[in-house]
Amino acid sequence: MNDYNDINKIIEDYPFDEDNPFLAEAPSEEKIYTREDFVNDEDE
């Protein structure tokens, strides 16, 4: 049951914009991967 509590803690720690949750900033230390990143890696 600890997994459920860990998930809740992660959600609490994540930046959240109540007005528009989908535009909330991701933590700056994490890289956000886009489809282009994976396509470029395959080409090299």
Image: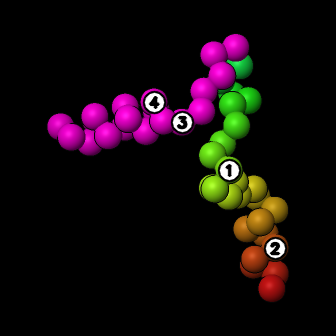
Hey, what amino acid is under mark 4?
Answer: Glu
Q: Which residues are magenta?
A: 1-19
Disc 2 or disc 4, which is closer to the eye? 4
What separation in Å lies between label 1 and label 4 (alpha carbons)?
16 Å
Residue 10, given in percent of the width and then of the height, sits at 43, 39
Q: Where is the N terminus found, in terms of image quarters?
A: top left
Question: Could you say whether the residue bearing mark 2 is in a helix, strand or loop?
Answer: helix
How far from the left and from the top, in percent, is residue 11?
46, 33
Per the image, the residue denoted by label 2 is 40
* Secondary element at tag 4: helix
For this orientation, the residue located farthest to the left is 1
Query: Which residue position holds label 4?
Result: 12
Circle 1 is placed at which residue position?
A: 28
User: If you read the primary sequence from the N terminus, does the residue marked by circle 1 or circle 4 appear first?
Assistant: 4
Distance from Cα at disc 2 to Cα at disc 3:
29 Å
Residue type (three-letter) at the residue carrying disc 3: Tyr
Circle 4/circle 3 CB separation < 8 Å: yes
